[in-house]
Image (cartoon, rainbow, N blue to C red):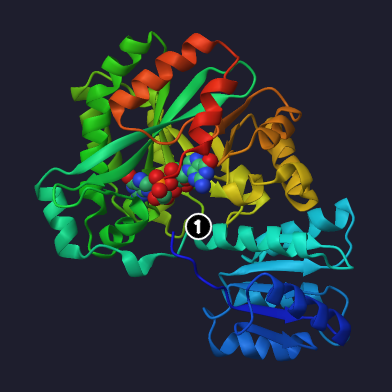
């Protein structure tokens, strides 16, 4: 991935803290892109000038005039999309409340750093900022509309498969289908971050979805037969696709052709965009009524707050990678994830931890409760069908002692 130096805003009424933060950021290779403010009002004015400029805002909580909570509320109202980090000592309850409030205001609170500020902690939070941005970045390397149309014409849209594995018994619960373009002109595999936005902008996303859906569901029975193991298949849908009231019928038709039922399928909807129209809710409900599983993807970076979770027809929640990475040492993520565990177990929702890369993260997550599914490079990267099948055959043979398998995949480079 291209290295991008983030634009950082630091807000604190103590000059000393601003100096320390600046020195730490310099040490981490960030110098020309830091802005500091001694009060929240001034900070807000700077943000308003260009709402997309700052990738991250580090803010104190306790400040005269406007405090940190109020600043976060205003940032939410402005639809500020970057990451917000609180620089202040907080106990569990305060973290939980602050995270929940920020979510209600559509703000991305991604962590907290106690004072005195330490370099390692700032560095860890900056990694989270980059992860948050990876949901929206890399648009500049997007392929063009014409290139995408060519890829569709040449039938180059290809499903890659990545398992979600039950943390308790190591069974493959489901397999997520992720889009790739295998271009004849280009040896590289083209990743979705380069073409999903293009597809959404130019009304080509349905073609991608249905092409993947047809290909993957037609292979579904063969895959489960080869593995002698039943699992569900999960597909990503962009929220705008829910505006098409006919979408469920189209999916049902393809399933019927392949002698499958909606209970074999999970539809993942990203949390990044709020589900806005009534039509989207109607389609979501209809899909659920037909028996599709409905998964809320990327939970933690988007707009759904804990209360809305209860009112929407989801059967599964996927915790975004930014909350999972280094969770074993990150109090903020621990508090947010633990309240998610409480809610989902009360409402009987499946929970998936996304982007598990390190054994320490898996060990930490295993302490929570039994029915958690894990998805991540630690177990397997997304793979083309035959590679996935041979990986899964090996996996099923290991029967709960997967260390040898997963270390090699986590160490691979993309
Ligand atoms: P997503 O739905 O959140 O999918 C998970 C992404 O995280 C995948 O990226 C996967 O390769 C990556 N991932 C999984 N485990 C790990 C890990 O341990 N570490 C790291 N660093 N990454 C991990 P991918 O395949 O590049 O897809 C990116 C996004 O593109 C997807 O995020 C999804 O939002 C979108 N996308 C992919 N296929 C489709 C599709 O068919 N339709 C639509 N609408 N969106 C799609
Ligand atoms: Ca997904
Ligand atoms: Ca996700």
Horizontally, residue 258 falls left or right of residue 24, namely left
Q: Residue at x 33, y 26 (%)?
A: 387
The picture quadrant where one finds residue 37 is bottom right
Quadrant in which the C terminus appears: top left
Q: Residue at x 26, y 35 (%)?
A: 213
Q: Helix, strand or loop at disc 1?
A: loop
Residue beneath disc 1 = 272
Q: Position of residue 142 (x, y in %)?
A: 30, 64
Residue 202 appears in the picture as rendered: yes
Query: Quick check: is the Cβ at mark 1 less than 8 Å away from ligand 1?
Result: yes
Q: In the displayed structure, would residue 103 be above or below residue 237?
A: below
The picture quadrant where one finds residue 227 is top left
Q: Position of residue 163 (x, y in %)?
A: 46, 29
Q: Residue at x 17, y 44 (%)?
A: 156
For the image, the number of numbered tags is 1
Q: Residue at x 26, y 49 (%)?
A: 188
Q: Along the line of sight, which residue is nearer the eye, 296 or 182?
A: 182
Q: Position of residue 48 (x, y in %)?
A: 59, 87
Specify the farthest residue to the left. 153
Other residues around mark 1 within 10 Å, as few (<14) / some (14–19) / many (≥20): some
């Amino acid at each position: 991935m291209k290295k991008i130096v983030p634009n950082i805003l630091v807000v604190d009424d103590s000059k000393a803290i601003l100096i320390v933060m600046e020195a730490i950021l310099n040490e981490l290779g960030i110098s020309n892109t830091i802005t500091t403010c001694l009060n929240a009002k001034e900070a807000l004015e700077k943000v308003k000038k260009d709402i997309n400029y700052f990738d991250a805002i580090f803010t104190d909580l306790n400040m005269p005039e406007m405090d940190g909570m109020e600043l976060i509320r205003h940032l939410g109202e402005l639809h500020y999309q970057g990451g917000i980090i609180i620089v202040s000592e907080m106990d569990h309850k305060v973290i939980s409340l602050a995270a929940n409030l920020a979510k209600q205001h559509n703000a991305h609170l991604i962590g907290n750093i106690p004072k005195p500020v330490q370099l390692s902690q700032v560095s860890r939070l900056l990694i989270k900022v980059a992860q948050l941005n990876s949901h929206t970045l890399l648009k500049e390397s997007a392929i063009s509309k014409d290139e995408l149309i060519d890829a569709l014409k040449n039938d180059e849209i290809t499903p890659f498969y990545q398992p979600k594995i039950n943390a308790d018994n190591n069974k493959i619960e489901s397999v997520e289908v992720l889009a790739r373009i295998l271009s004849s002109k280009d040896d590289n595999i083209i990743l979705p971050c380069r073409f999903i936005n293009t597809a959404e902008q130019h009304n080509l996303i349905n073609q991608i979805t249905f092409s993947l859906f047809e290909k993957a569901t037609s292979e579904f029975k063969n895959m489960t037969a080869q593995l002698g193991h039943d699992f569900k298949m999960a597909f990503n849908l962009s929220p705008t696709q829910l505006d098409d009231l006919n979408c469920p019928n189209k999916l049902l038709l393809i399933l019927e052709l392949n002698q499958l039922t909606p209970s074999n399928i999970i539809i993942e909807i990203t949390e990044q965009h709020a589900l806005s129209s009534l039509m989207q809710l109607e389609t979501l409900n209809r899909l659920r009524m037909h028996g599709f599983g409905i998964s809320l993807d990327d939970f933690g970076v988007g707009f759904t707050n804990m209360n809305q979770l209860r009112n929407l027809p989801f059967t599964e929640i996927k915790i975004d990678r930014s909350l999972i990475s280094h969770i074993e040492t990150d109090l903020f993520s621990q508090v947010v994830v633990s309240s998610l565990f409480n809610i989902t177990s009360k409402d009987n929702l499946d929970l998936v931890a996304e982007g598990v890369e390190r054994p320490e993260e898996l060990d930490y997550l295993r302490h929570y409760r039994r029915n958690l599914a894990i998805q991540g490079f630690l177990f397997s990267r997304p793979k083309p069908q035959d590679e996935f099948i041979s990986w899964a055959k090996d996996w099923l043979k290991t029967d709960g002692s997967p260390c040898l398998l997963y270390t090699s995949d986590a160490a691979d480079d993309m």
